[in-house]
Image: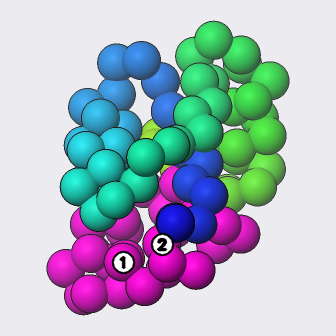
């Protein structure tokens, strides 16, 4: 079982798609996707919570990971799988 994953994203974001592929490759079966292109109020929520304006913004459990580059760096450093394990 993996920690819950929440990702602020848009339909056309290539980094969102890459993040989803990486997470699935590491065993994540479910991602709570918050589509800020469909609900602009959620974009304001994302900016308030993360201080960032770009997508994806990824949470694993209560930990704000950041965007795809941050997620990828965690994976390269061997820290993503333990974070997903909770």
Say whether marks 1 and 2 touch (CB < 8 Å). Answer: yes
Q: Residue at x 71, y 16 (%)?
A: 39
> Which residue position holds label 2?
84
- Residue 84 inside the magenta-drawn segment: yes
| Quarter where residue 80 is shown | bottom left
Side (left or right) of 24 relative to 52? left
Locate residue 67, reporting x and y percent. Answer: 42, 56
The residue that disc 1 covers is 81
Q: Quadrant of the C terminus?
A: bottom right
Q: Quadrant of residue 69?
A: bottom left
Q: Is residue 68 visible?
A: no
Label 1's element? helix
Outermost front residue: 1
Q: Which residues are magenta?
A: 58-86
Asked whether 86 or 57 is in front, the reply is: 86
In this rendering, the answer to whether 34 lies above or below 73 is: above
> Where residue 38 sits in the image (x, y, percent)?
63, 11
Query: Helix, strand, or loop for circle 2?
Result: helix
Query: Which residue does the image show at 36% across and 65% down from the upper left?
Result: 71
């Amino acid at each position: 079982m993996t920690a819950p994953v929440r990702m602020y994203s848009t339909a056309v974001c290539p980094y969102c798609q890459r993040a989803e592929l990486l997470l699935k490759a590491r065993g994540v079966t479910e991602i709570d996707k918050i589509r800020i292109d469909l609900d602009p109020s959620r974009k304001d929520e994302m900016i308030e919570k993360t201080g960032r304006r770009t997508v994806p913004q990824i949470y694993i459990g209560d930990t704000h990971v950041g965007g795809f580059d941050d997620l990828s760096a965690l994976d390269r450093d061997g820290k993503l799988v333990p974070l997903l394990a909770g």
